[in-house]
Image (cartoon, rainbow, N blue to C red):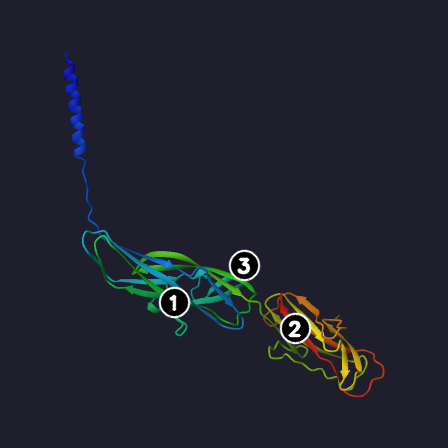
Amino acid sequence: MKTIYDYLGSRRKLLFTIGILLLITPMVFAFGVLEETLSISSTPSPITVTHNLDITDQQTETLTVQQYLFNYASSTKTQSASSTLIVFSAGNSGDIYDREATHTNGTDTIHYNFYNNSVDHDLITDYTNYSGPTDGLTHTFPSVSVARFNSYTATKDHDFIIEILDGQYVPAGTYQDSVDVSLYKGANLEETVTMLVTITVEATVGLSIVDVGAAYNANSTGYSMDFGSLTEGESLEADAVARANTTYSISVYSYNGSKMKHETVDEYVPYTFSVDNTIVTMSSAMTPVEAVTTTATPSTGTAHRLKVLIDSYSWVPAGEYEDNLVFEITGN
C-alpha cells in the first residue's frame, strides 16, 4: 500500500511533464517580403454630363491609380517596374464602339463614347478588344527600393474624354449607363470598379414660320403675308413648324390687337387669327396669348397651320395697313 508521500510524488511528476510540453511548443519565424497593391483609388463616379442636342459635347474626366508597397522583410527590397492598363467595359449596349445610356423612361437611348484624348480620338476598349497602348489608359510605375518595415505610395492620374455627338434627336431628361473600369498589371486583373455615367439632355425647342407644307427651317424666323388689295373674307395661311424634344407651348401677341393699322393715321382693318383651326383672340395689344400646348415633336418637327382672315370693316382711307405678330415657343 502506497503512502501519502507516494501520491504526492506522482502528482509532482505529472505537473513536471505538463511543464515540459509547454516549453517545447514549436515557434515559427516567417521571413517577410515586399508586397505590392495596385488599385483604382479615385474614379469619377458618377460622370455627369449636360448635353445640348445642337452641339457635340466633350468633357474631360480623371481617374487615379495607386501603387502601395510595404516591405515586411528585414532588409531593403526593390520592386521592379510595374506596367498598368485601364480599360472600360461596353456598358449597357454591349458594344464598345457604340456605348449608349438609357433614358429613365426605359426606352430611349443616347449614344456616347470614351476616348484617350480629343485630338486623335483613340477609343478606350475593353480587355478583350485591347490591341495596343492607345486602346486604354497605360502607365509604368518605375522600379523603387523600400527600406525594411517601411511603406511607399505612388499615384498616377489618367485623363480621358467622354464625348456625345450632336445630331441625336432624343427626348429631354436623364440617361444612365453603368461601365466597369478594370485595372490590369500585365495580364493579371488587379481590380474592377463600377463607374456610373449620367447624361442630362437639355430641353431644346425651335420654331420656324414657313410656307404651307414646307419643312422646319431654323433660319426662317420671319414671314410676310401680303394681301395686296384688301377684300373682306380674304385669307392667307402659313405654317409654324415647331421642333421640340419636350412638351412645349406656343404663345403669340399682336402689336395692334388683331387689327392692321394704317401707315399714317389711326385707322384699322380687323382680322381673325387662328392656329390649327382654333381662333386665338388677341384683343389686347402686346399681350401674349397661349395658342398651342402639346407634346414633343419628331426630329422633323410638327407643323401648326396659321390663318389670317380679313373681317368686315367700314370705310377706311386708302393706304397700307400692317400688323405684326410675335411668336414664342417655350419648353415645359
Residue beneath disc 3: 104
Describe residue 235's horizontal placement relative to residue 131 as left or right: right
- Residue 13: % across, % down: 15, 24
For the C terminus, the image quarter is bottom right
- Specify the label residue 45 is tagged with: none
Name the front one of labels 3 and 2: 2
Let me know if residue 130 appears in the view: no
Name the secondary structure under disc 1. strand
Does 152 appear above or below 224? above
Q: CA distance from mark 2 to mark 1?
A: 42 Å
- Location of residue 325 by image quarter: bottom right
Whether residue 69 is situated above or below residue 201 in the rendered picture: above
Q: Earlier in the sequence, mark 3 or mark 2?
A: 3
Tell me the kind of residue under disc 2: Glu
Q: Going by the image, does 87 lie left or right of 31?
A: right
Question: In the picture provided, is 307 more to the left or to the right than 92?
Answer: right
Answer whether residue 13 is visible to the viewer in this image: yes
Query: Which residue in the rendered view is the most extreme toward the top?
Result: 1
Badge 1: few (under 14), some or many (20 or more) residues near its Cα, within 10 Å?
A: some
Picture coordinates of residue 296, whole percent (x, y): 62, 66
Of discs 3 and 1, which sits in the foreground? Answer: 1
Q: Residue furthest bottom?
A: 318
Which residue is the site of mark 2? 328
Where is the N terminus found, in terms of image quarters? top left
Which amino acid type is marked by label 1? Asp
Q: Label for residue 159? A: 1
Q: Which badge, 3 or 1, comes first in the chain's sequence?
A: 3
The part of the image, by quadrant, that contains residue 275 is: bottom right
Residue type, mark 3 in image: Thr
